Amino acid sequence: MNFWKKPVETFHELLQRKAPHLRQIRHFNSGSLGREVSFDLYLPPDYHLSGGRVYPLLLVNDGQDLPRMNFSGILENLYFHKRLPQIIAVGIHASGERMREYGTVRQADYKGRGDKAVHYRNFILEELLPFLYRRFRLSGLREETAFAGFSLGGLSAFDISWAHPQIFGTAGVFSGSLWWRWSPVDPADPDADRILHDVIRKTAQIDDNQRFWFQCGTLDEEDDRNHNGVIDAIDDTLDLIRELKNKGFHEHSIRYLELTDGRHEPDTWGKAMPDFLRWTFAAEEGD
């Protein structure tokens, strides 16, 4: 956009652009977590003028990182170019209990981390979602409801979504901590004992209408515990995708985005965010 070369067109575009309305919720009391929770709501630009229109919902763990990736600007740009239907996004801030609240509900990891994951799950299902459905115009359709997160927040989002397919149609995992395990790494079998992989294998019934989006960066980390020349973050993600396919999920239900030189940080996740949003909510042909 260059005002001096195309002043009329540039001015027209500025008038057409509309940013989401940011509403900050602080001191939301959670009985499940025994603490107050903060979260940010990104309401559609025309929310207050749209009458009875209802909207898709996106929950995001580690929502405190969304401003660092200019999430509001990402939405504004996608809305302006009509590449995304308007949605309601909720960025849930993590607390000092993050390492205990994020994890897998079935069990904590071998260091006891994630021991409050069941309480966090209860907060999402029994407190946050009912509040959002009471206060905001949400469609409530599972195909229009997604849960995403970054790093350990991605592990948590996937775990909760997987267990509740009747609520969450899509899970988004950015640089997910899919190494989460119930015992230390055994050099003789370095890929054993990963909790989420085992959860998928042992799930008796699946909903093959669920969709899963994954992102990794080639510089997410340097560790390569099985010495196959592939960093663990990518290995763990590709192995999880294989488990999903072994369960019967079709290729079109899974998307994997690998960013060359992508790092374990909000700047990289911001670059991947438009792909996730469009794949999840725009359902474009060929995705």
Image: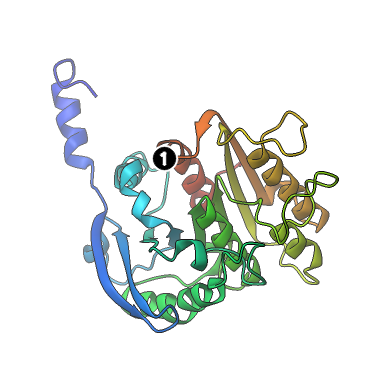
Query: Would you identify the image quadrant in which residue 36 lies?
Result: bottom left
- Give above or below for 102 relative to 119: above
Residue sitting at x 20%, y 20%: 2
Residue type at mark 1: give it.
Answer: Gly
Frontmost residue, 287 versus 190: 190
Quadrant assignment for the N terminus: top left
Q: Is residue 109 left or right of residue 90?
A: right
Q: Is residue 253 left or right of residue 141?
A: right
**Residue 145 seen by the camera:** no
- Give above or below for 138 relative to 147: below
Residue holding disc 1:
270
Query: Would you identify the image quadrant in which residue 162 lies?
Result: bottom right
Residue 77, given in percent of the width and then of the height, sits at 33, 40
**Residue 277 seen by the camera:** yes
Q: Label 1: few (<14), some or many (≥20) within 10 Å?
A: some
Residue 31, given in percent of the width and then of the height, sits at 40, 84
- Give above or below for 264 relative to 137: above
